[in-house]
Image (tube, rainbow, N blue to C red):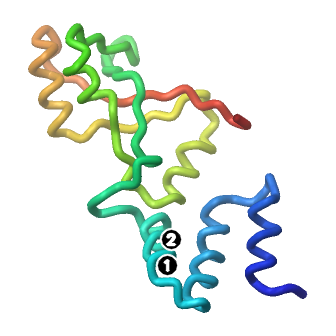
Amino acid sequence: MGSIVQELQMEAMSSTSNISGLLRKSLVVARKLKIKDFEDWVNQELNGYSEEVPEYREISGNIQYLDVYNGWYPAFIRDEKTADLFRKSKLYHPITEIEDLVNRESKYLAIEIPQILQNSLLKLFNEIESAQFRLCFLKLKGC
């Protein structure tokens, strides 16, 4: 049997490995080798971010609102700068939650917009009295 570093390398090259498993093994390696920065990063990936989020965890999608009678509809905002404020999101979630979202049987990945932003959207869409908003992304598995 090889070292844990070699095992990690082999698993990283396998298309069947999951990210959370790789990160847990990486945490063991970081602790063994006493690489504090790497250990801190792995811990944040596994447990979620509380403050600053790396750039690769910033995503953008399409805003949708839920009409309780007819389902989800696109929410169009005329002003592009304003629309960009709502289209972008930071993924603070633990990697296991992100894996769960990605692995669901749906061609879309949907993330609920925080309530404070939903309240602002309701003000923009004054004809809508109450709604639930979400960011929606087309999932491209295997890409």
Q: Residue at x 50, y 71 (%)?
A: 42
Residue occupying the point 35% across, 45% down: 90
75 sits to left or right of 119: right
Question: The N terminus appears in which quarter of the rendering?
Answer: bottom right
Callout 2: few (<14), some (14-19), or many (20+) C-alpha neighbours within 10 Å? many
Q: Which residue is mark 1?
A: 39
Give the number of the disc on residue 42: 2
| Amino acid identity at mark 2 | Val
Q: Secondary structure at mark 1?
A: helix
Q: Nearer the viewer, residue 32 or 64?
A: 32
Residue 7 in the image, given as x and y percentages of width and height: 80, 76
Residue 93 position within the rendered picture, expressed as x and y whole percent measured from the top left:
41, 55
Where residue 9 appears, as percent x and y from the top left, is 77, 70
Q: Are marks 2 and 1 in contact (CB under 8 Å)?
A: yes
Q: For residue 74, which numbered disc appears in the image?
A: none
Q: Is residue 27 left or right of residue 133?
A: right
Looking at numbered disc 1 in the image, what kind of residue is underneath it? Glu
Q: Residue furthest right?
A: 1
Identify which residue is drawn at 75% across, 60% down.
Answer: 17
Q: Quadrant of residue 31?
A: bottom right
The x and y percentages for residue 99 are: 57, 51
Q: Residues within 10 Å of mark 1 (few under 14, many from 20)?
A: many
Gap in angstroms between the C-alphas marked 2 and 1: 5 Å
The answer to whether 124 is drawn above or below residue 44 in the figure is above
> Which quadrant would the C terminus be assigned to in this image?
top right
Q: Residue at x 80, y 59 (%)?
A: 13
Q: Is residue 57 above or below residue 112?
A: below
Give the quadrant of residue 3.
bottom right
Q: Assign a secondary structure to mark 2.
A: helix
